[in-house]
Amino acid sequence: MNEKEQLTAARERVIETIAKNMNLYGISDSIGRLYGLMYFQNQPMTLDEMKEELGMSKTSMSTSVRSLMELKMVEKVWRKGERKDLYKAEGDWHQTFVDQFSIRWRPSITMSITTMEKSKRELESIVNDVDTDEKVRLEALEDIEKLTAALDYYDWLNRLVTSFESGEIFNYIKKENPNKE
């Protein structure tokens, strides 16, 4: 195997691993492969170039690129004299993780807090109603305790996501490995 073949094999191995790891983010293998391909490019790519490299349809490429753009993993770039749209991969994996984490968790946190606060208010009404059966009142009080604990968790998770978005997390866990020589 010559050097060019070794280079290609090494890249393909990493691209395949990237594709498999993208499942953690809910991203298909084919979109993961596209990101991996773009990651190793030294210049932005057109949809036609992506199609040629991966053997997928231009429609699939367009849909995949759009998905990666929504996830902030790929951006559209401009180059003087180029008439076709060009795209390049986000090379900062720390930022990619932060974006994925935030994009995935923020809506879930908001929905959960809203739902739990509404249910907690309803349970408090049950507890405060003088006509409520004592057994139901005790169950409602237990549920309020559970929801209070869950809301504490979502408050923590909200602060965690904020620490990622603000970059504060990197004050505690450095991007650079301190043990690296």
Image: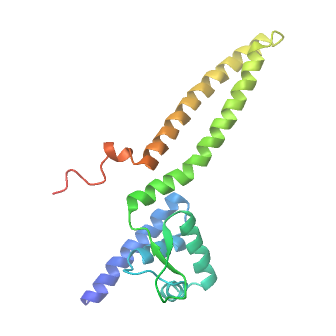
Give the percent coordinates (x, y) of residue 123: 73, 22
Give the percent coordinates (x, y) of residue 179: 19, 51
Residue at 59% across, 42% down: 109
Farthest right residue in view = 131
Farthest left residue in view = 181
Give the percent coordinates (x, y) of residue 28: 55, 68
Q: Is residue 144 left or right of residue 43?
A: right
Give the percent coordinates (x, y) of residue 93: 39, 61
> According to the image, what is the colour scheme of the structure?
rainbow
Q: Is residue 169 above or below residue 76?
A: above
Q: Is residue 81 above or below residue 113?
A: below
Of residue 91 and residue 25, the one placed in the foreground of this image is: 91
Residue at 41% across, 68% down: 17
Farthest front residue in view = 80
Residue at 44% across, 77% down: 38
Q: Quadrant of residue 8?
A: bottom left
Of residue 33 and residue 76, the one placed in the foreground of this image is: 76
Locate the N terminus by quadrant: bottom left
Locate the C terminus by quadrant: bottom left
Q: Is residue 148 left or right of residue 169?
A: right
Residue at 51% across, 63% down: 72
